[in-house]
Image (cartoon, rainbow, N blue to C red):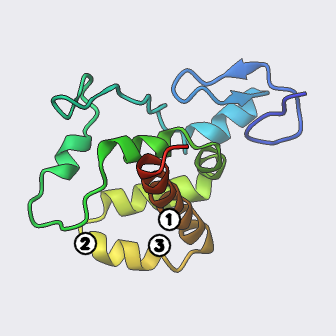
Amino acid sequence: MQLCNVCCEQTPKYRCPTCEIRYCSLGCYKKHKDTCLPVVKPCSYNPEDAVCSEACGVEDLLHEDDIIDKVPLQRLQLLGQSNELRDLLCNPHLRQLLRSVDGAQRKDEAMKAAMQEPLFVEFSDQCLKLVEDGATALTNPQ
């Protein structure tokens, strides 16, 4: 039996049109709408020309020549397929932390502050694990 993603007590009757989580009541919807994030659908990757067929915004992050460690798009897409990350992102506190880092003027300071939060560290570690394990899986297919 599925439970409401907001209160985790009742059977959900509704689905959020923005992020598609399930909730049980107007009260839960009102709580949820303050932290709601749209669903990010993975874009399709064409290895021949190394661009997304949809405008997914990743190429904006990957064009900087001064970054030594670049994660290939194929590995970044593993993040969108992770149930562990999706579970972590159900936490409204984590989503608010991510928004505050994203919207900060001084991202380096915002990251330092966020890394003091165990939940953010857990999220970061899970992202790195997926990307690093993905590198191993891509170079050593079984």
Residue pointed to by mark 1? 124
Q: Quadrant of residue 83?
A: top right
Depth check: give the residue in front, 96 or 122: 122
Disc 2 on helix, strand or loop? loop
Q: Quadrant of residue 110?
A: bottom left
Depth check: give the residue in front, 121 or 49: 49
Instruction: Report the amino acid beneath label 1.
Output: Ser
Q: Which mark is residue 133?
A: none
Instruction: Report the amino acid beneath label 3.
Output: Ala
Instruction: Report the amino acid beneath label 2.
Output: Arg
Depth check: give the residue in front, 140 or 73: 140
Q: Position of residue 86 (x, y in %)?
A: 60, 44
Q: Nearer the viewer, mark 3 or mark 1?
A: 1
* Label 2 vs 1, first from the N-terminus: 2
Q: Is residue 36 left or right of residue 3?
A: left
Which image quadrant: the N terminus? top right
Residue pointed to by mark 2? 106
